[in-house]
Image (cartoon, grey):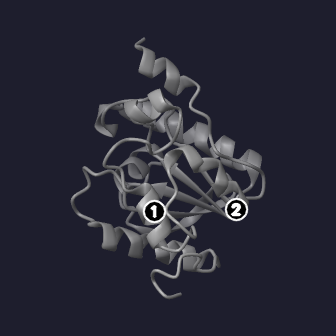
Amino acid sequence: MRKSEEAAATLPDVLAEGLRVVFAGINPGLSSAAAGHSFHTPGNRFWPALHRSGFTPRQLRAEEERLLLGWGLGITSIVRRPTVRAAQLSRDELVDGGRDLAERIRAIGPEWLAVLGVTGYRTAFGAPGARLGPQTGTIGGARVWIVPNPSGLNAHFPPAALAVEFAKLRVAAGIPDRSGVLGG
């Protein structure tokens, strides 16, 4: 196992009981795992999207991720193994990760689980027809919303469109606009 992969094995979740929204990435990138902070990968647009959509009052740095807990937000991933790209994960890893995520969510009881990326969700949870937005049913007791993957590799959603998709979830979760960027 390479050093960056060993670091990811200890990449801590940013979780607590009773959160409003937990964001679940597909899996850590090697850069994030090596840094020890979620969404640390250069080019990842998670932190700008979180701010521009109104979840946070300013754009956070990955090293400030634990501040999210004070706003009722958390971060985890479906699969804990780091890779350069999520496409390197096997179907079995995603399915096993989905079961593990459901158990972690059940243990902390958030209102919403926001999965970052429809393709990973479809595989992990056996939902081939899933689309962005709210899903029917729950995972670990939490309502589920799929937002676009914020990876810089996702060209389908430029930053402004990504923020709009995140803001739809924020509104559904009843969280006020903390940024003022979108005006509500």
Q: Amino acid at mark 1?
A: Ile
Mark 1, secondary structure of its residue: strand
Cα–Cα span, label 1 and label 2: 18 Å
Q: Which residue is mark 1?
A: 146
Determine which of the numbered discs, if any, sits on residue 158 in the image: none
Residue visible at 25% across and 50% down in the picture: 153
Give the residue at x 31% y 32%.
84
**Dot 2: what SS?**
loop
- The single residue placed furthest to the left in the displayed view is 155
Residue 22 lies, with reference to residue 164, above or below; the image says above
Q: Quadrant of residue 102?
A: top right
- 11 vs 125: above or below: above
Who is closer to the viewer here, 114 or 100? 114
Q: Residues within 10 Å of mark 1 (few under 14, many from 20)?
A: many
Point out residue 56 in the picture as x, y percentages from the top left corner: 57, 67
Total residue callouts: 2
| Occupied quadrant, residue 22 | bottom right
> Which residue occupies 40% across, 51% down?
122
Judge left or right: residue 42 versus residue 175.
Answer: left
Q: Which mark is residue 72?
A: 2
Closer to us: 1 or 124:
1
Q: Does 12 sit left or right of 8 as displayed?
A: right
**Front residue of 24 and 54:** 54
Q: Which amino acid, by three-letter code, is at mark 2?
A: Gly
